[in-house]
Amino acid sequence: MKNLSINFYRYLVLSIAWVFFTFYLLIIYSHKESSTISFPFLDKVVHFILFFIQSILITNTMYEYSDRNNRIIIIASIISLLLFGLIIEIQQIYLPYRTFEIMDFIANFLGVLSGSFVVIYFRKNK
């Protein structure tokens, strides 16, 4: 059995916690429209940030676990997070207080790609 570093377990716990937090915000939480905060496309920014952070956590978790090629890790991370984002968006079709929006999925996609590239950059310059 492979001897895993403490960093793997840190990233794993944070990744799991962030998945639950993201699920809560995007599926369970029902926000009331507020007149005090008026920022165009705020929900798209939230989607981007949630998936950006998730991408950093998942990609680092996979790097710490695997001895495989970096390209395989990045592709697996991107595909798994895009599927997660798509499932979240599809679930919103069936919720009366949510709507499916392709722009939300695009924000998820951009967050995933950006987070993956940040990990690549910092791991190469370590």
Image (spheres, grey):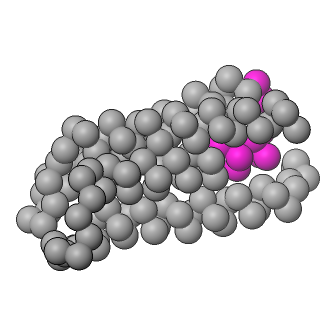
Q: Is residue 33 above or below residue 49?
A: below
Where is residue 55? Give x, y as percent.
Answer: 56, 46
* The furthest residue to the left: 96
Tell me the chief SS of the magenta region. Answer: helix
Quarter of the image holding residue 22? bottom left
What's the residue at 67%, 59% (across, down)? 12
116 left or right of 32?
A: right
Would residue 64 be visible to someone looking at this image? yes
71 left or right of 102?
A: right
Quarter of the image holding residue 124? top right
Q: Is residue 33 above or below residue 89?
A: below
The magenta-colored residue range is: 59-69
Quadrant of the drawing holding the C terminus? top right
* The furthest residue to the right: 3
Find out whether residue 63 is within the magenta segment.
Answer: yes
Would residue 81 be visible to someone looking at this image? no
- Figure label count: 0
What's the residue at 77%, 38% (across, down)? 122
Where is residue 37? Give x, y as percent.
Answer: 26, 70
Quarter of the image holding residue 101? top left
Find out whether residue 86 is within the magenta segment.
Answer: no
Q: Is residue 34 above or below residue 119?
A: below
Of residues 3 and 86, the one nearer the viewer is: 86
Where is residue 52? Give x, y as percent.
Answer: 52, 47
Q: Is residue 18 above or below residue 110?
A: below
What's the residue at 49%, 61% (across, down)? 19
What's the residue at 76%, 62% (across, down)? 9
43 left or right of 114?
A: left
